[in-house]
Image (tube, helix red, strand yellow):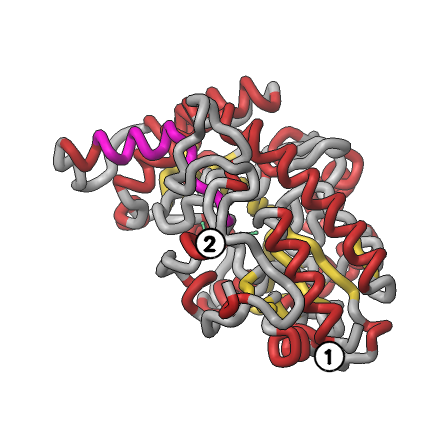
Amino acid sequence: MSDDCVPGARVPDVPASGAPASGAPASGEEGNPLRRLSLAELRRRTSAKWRTYPPDVLPLWVAEMDAMPAGAVTRALTAALALGDTGYPWGPGYAEAWDSFARKRWGWDGVAPERTATVADVMRGSVEMLKLVTGPGDAVVVSPPVYPPFYGFVEHEDRRVVEAPLGEDGRLRASALEAAFRRATAGGRRAAYLLCNPHNPTGTVHTRAELTAVAELANAYGIRVVADEIHAPLVLPGAQYVPYLSVPGAEDAFCLLSASKAWNLAGLKAAVAVAGPAAADDLARLPQIVSHGPSHLGVVAHTAALRDGGDWLDALLPALDDNRRLLGELLERHLPEIRYLRPEGTYLAWLDCRALGLGDDPAAVFLERGRVALSGGLPFGTGGAGHVRLNFAASPEVLTEAVRRMAAAVGR
Ligand SMILES: Cc1ncc(COP(=O)(O)O)c(C=O)c1O
């Protein structure tokens, strides 16, 4: 793989497990989904992760996983295609699958299908919920550093972004939230808070106490909360996902769920918006045209993932946990100046590179000198300068090579 490697390093072109490169698990069980494709196979993909940069760049940026899909998803899509079942989505099946999954996995009974809407994807769904409870010119509070489209989507709908930054520890700060809520509602305006739970890019999994404090503050200032919970199934050992709608005081909130991150289905769009009991009347005002967004094959794939893809998720999570540990060890060994905020969930690592003295955009340096693509921190808002986000949903070999390239970029 000479095109992939700077001198002295090699990323194997065979799956590290020794499993067949076809991606079929040898024993009929799922196996580690991140070890099933070689780098040469991944480079044949045509999605953004693999095509944005030239082939000598190792991509660990956008939130796509180097995973093969769950067998349940492949079977459901194959069956749909065999029937020509490629029309429009219909019915409550996707929301019902979320309801069952939430009960089984989290012991949570809050995904009441009668209070849900199937939407195009999480960002479109979040915006539609924000439009139900705010008007043009109203404020939407976000907690940076945060997933950059939170800014773009909110501003595109003529709302104002007000920031309530996380602390240096990547956790919500009541004082910042209160100041932002006060600013957002000044003059008696309506306002909302777009919460990210778990949080991208820090991988913070908000605790019940933190979320309860959010609900108390939101109620005190009349702020409506929309919780983007796309990463909920990706919580790693040591932390526990708490659905925002399950905390006291969150009855008038909305949350967005989707199988797209956890089962790597971003190309098969679908998501579910869930209204708390006191937001049901608001959800009933959702224009009918919003139901035109989701893809039928997206709904088919996500529903299969939720109903029958639990084993696959159970194989993925320990692999992500191992990579989380490996990344910490590699950074400690090769780039000890980088502060690694060990994520509690997601497959994203937020790296503070300020001590390396690479300026506001270290990702540009790693790309140019190391030929490794990470997400630059600047678009994540306040707190993003000097940081990069690294996607560790890759094989350990790719992860090792990525850190080696980062180190080489700064002369190590
Ligand atoms: C927090 C968060 N929300 C939303 C999305 C995008 O989801 P969708 O494609 O369903 O809009 C992502 C993608 O990485 C994300 O991390």
Q: Taking 118 as reference, is 133 left or right?
A: right
* Three-letter code for the amino acid on which mark 1 is drawn: Asp
Q: Residue furthest left?
A: 84
Figure check: 71 above or below 88: above
Above or below — where is 412 with respect to 102?
Answer: below
**Mark 1 Cα within 10 Å, few/some/many (few <14, many 20+)?**
some
Q: Which residue position is annotated with label 2?
A: 123
Image x and y of residue 170, in percent: 78, 54
Left/right of residue 17 with respect to residue 303 in the rendered view: right
* Residue range of the region highlighted in magenta in the rendering: 66-79
Q: Is residue 278 visible?
A: no
Residue 319 magenta-highlighted: no
Q: Residue at x 42, y 59 (%)?
A: 43
Residue under numbered circle 1: 360
Q: Which residue sits at x=53%, y=70%?
A: 57
Residue 147 position, x and y percent, is 59, 59
Q: At numbered mark 2, what does the secondary structure look like: helix, strand or loop?
A: helix
Ligand 1 contact, mark 2 (Cβ < 8 Å): yes
Q: Is residue 111 left or right of residue 75?
A: right
**Relative height, residue 327 to residue 383 (above, below):** above
- Residue depicted at x 67% and y 32%: 242
Q: Specify the principal SS of the magenta part.
A: helix
Near mark 2 (Cα within 10 A), the count class, few <14, some 14-19 or many ≥20, is: some
Which corner quadrant holds the C terminus? bottom right
Mark 1 beta carbon near ligand 1 (under 8 Å): no
Give residue 317's position: percent from left, percent from top. Answer: 61, 34
In this view, the residue in front, 71 or 186, is 71
What x and y, as percent, mark residue 50? 44, 62
